[in-house]
Amino acid sequence: MIPIQRVRLDLISLNHEAEQRDVELVQDPATGDFVANGLQLTINGWWEIDVLVRRAGLEDEIVPFFFLIPDPNINGFDAPQFDSSSDEAQALFECAGYGDESHQRALHRAAGVRFGWCGDF
């Protein structure tokens, strides 16, 4: 495996005029993990994080992730509701099956998102 040389984050609020770009992660010499020191997201709503990974001799890879603050899995019905959404977030939501009535089917399809079976986002 080619070692990772750099990990950078671009954090973009999808509901507010807020962003934090070029957040460099630092590699822990003891574990090899990349960590962000002092990073705090305090604005509620949908966020996109574009993760850039650089390896020697390969093109940079950028992968987007979408998440909601606060996490509705933890906050339940107390999580804020938002009327607007991005097309990318909506596509991930539908692909994962979260709008589906069958909990079992949603779990299977969510696993598909984890392993990239829902296409390129």
Image (cartoon, rainbow, N blue to C red):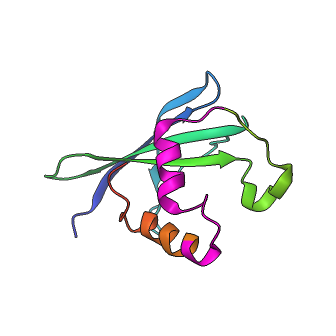
- With respect to residue 8, does 99 lie above or below? below
- Residue 103, percent from left and from top: 64, 74
- Residue 71, percent from left and from top: 72, 53
- With respect to residue 76, does 16 lie above or below? above
The answer to whether residue 29 is left or right of residue 17 is left
Q: Which residues are magenta?
A: 84-105
Which residue reaches farthest left?
A: 57
State the residue in front, 14 or 82: 82
The answer to whether residue 25 is left or right of residue 39 is left
Whether residue 83 is visible: yes
The answer to whether residue 111 is left or right of residue 71 is left
Q: Quadrant of residue 50?
A: top left
Residue drawn at (36%, 63%), measured in percent from left and top?
A: 116
Which residue reaches farthest bottom?
A: 104
- Residue 56, percent from left and from top: 18, 53
- Reply yes or no: does residue 103 show up in magenta: yes
Which residue reaches farthest right?
A: 78
Which residue reaches farthest front?
A: 101
Whether residue 10 is visible: no
Residue drawn at (74%, 48%), measured in percent from left and top?
A: 70
State the residue in front, 89 or 13: 89
Residue drawn at (60%, 60%), measured in percent from left and top?
A: 98
State the residue in front, 64 or 61: 64
- Residue 18, percent from left and from top: 61, 25
- Reply yes or no: does residue 72 show up in magenta: no
Quadrant in which the N terminus is drawn: bottom left
Residue drawn at (73%, 61%), measured in percent from left and top?
A: 73
Q: How many marks?
A: 0
